[in-house]
Image (cartoon, rainbow, N blue to C red):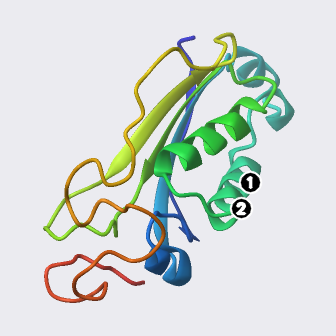
Amino acid sequence: MRDRVALRGLRACGHHGVFDFERREGQDFVVDAVLHLDTVPAAASDDVGDTVHYGLLADRLAAIVAGEPVNLIETLAERLAAECLAEPLVERAEVTVHKPSAPIGHEFADVSVTVTRDRSEPRGGGTRTRREPGDLGDPRDPGGPGDPPGPEPGGRGERRVRT
């Protein structure tokens, strides 16, 4: 599919993350969605009913970000892609979730996950090895619920942006 409709930089507050403070305080997430569909019918009819109404889609995507918390932005991206594919005309969706205030103790430009889902591709897994919490041998790798040891979020060395 050569045609695309893109919605970039959709910002919404959500309570996603593996740490208690992320769930408690919330933070902004930024979503980019690129939808692959045939825009020829819409161009010919000049009717929004023949394409994706990106304003209404933005409302639904923002509601997902603001909705039920998940641990991983991979899970959030999957939910957002499924909502994009719920649009009957969309054949493929590429969704990127940015987490600009990720709890990383270093200055960084971006943390994001991008998923591409195609209406015709079955999803599901093959065999893989799962990493268990704590396998990284790093105190920031959560071994279970709770906050990481060390300074409170927003303290020295963490990039916490509140808007």
Residue under the image location 39 percent in, 84 percent down = 162
Lateral position of residue 3 relative to residue 29, left or right: right
Q: How many marks?
A: 2
Question: Is residue 9 at all visible to an observer of this figure?
Answer: no
Q: Nearer the viewer, residue 67 or 40?
A: 67
Tell me which amino acid carries mark 2. Ala
Q: Nearer the viewer, residue 61 or 9?
A: 61
SS label for mark 1:
helix
Q: Position of residue 19 (x, y in %)?
A: 44, 70
Q: Nearer the viewer, residue 5 or 140?
A: 140
Tell me which amino acid carries mark 1. Arg
Contact (Cβ within 8 Å) of mark 1 with mark 2: yes
Near mark 2 (Cα within 10 A), the count class, few <14, some 14-19 or many ≥20, is: some
Residue under the image location 51 percent in, 77 percent down = 26
Q: Give the quadrant of the C terminus.
A: bottom left
Q: Position of residue 37 (x, y in %)?
A: 66, 20
Near mark 1 (Cα within 10 A), the count class, few <14, some 14-19 or many ≥20, is: some
Residue under the image location 44 percent in, 75 percent down = 146
Q: Give the quadrant of the N terminus.
A: top right
Above or below, 48 relative to 154: above
Could you give the CA–CA distance between mark 1 and mark 2, rounded to whole angstroms? Answer: 5 Å
Q: Give the residue at mark 2.
A: 63
Lateral position of residue 89 relative to residue 6, left or right: right
Q: Give the residue at mark 1.
A: 60
In the picture, the disc for residue 160 is none
Lateral position of residue 16 relative to residue 158, left or right: right
SS label for mark 2:
helix
Instruction: Specify the quadrant of the image occupied by residue 114.
Output: top left
Instruction: Specify the quadrant of the image occupied by residue 137.
Output: bottom left
Question: Is residue 108 at all visible to an observer of this figure?
Answer: yes
Residue under the image location 72 percent in, 58 percent down = 59
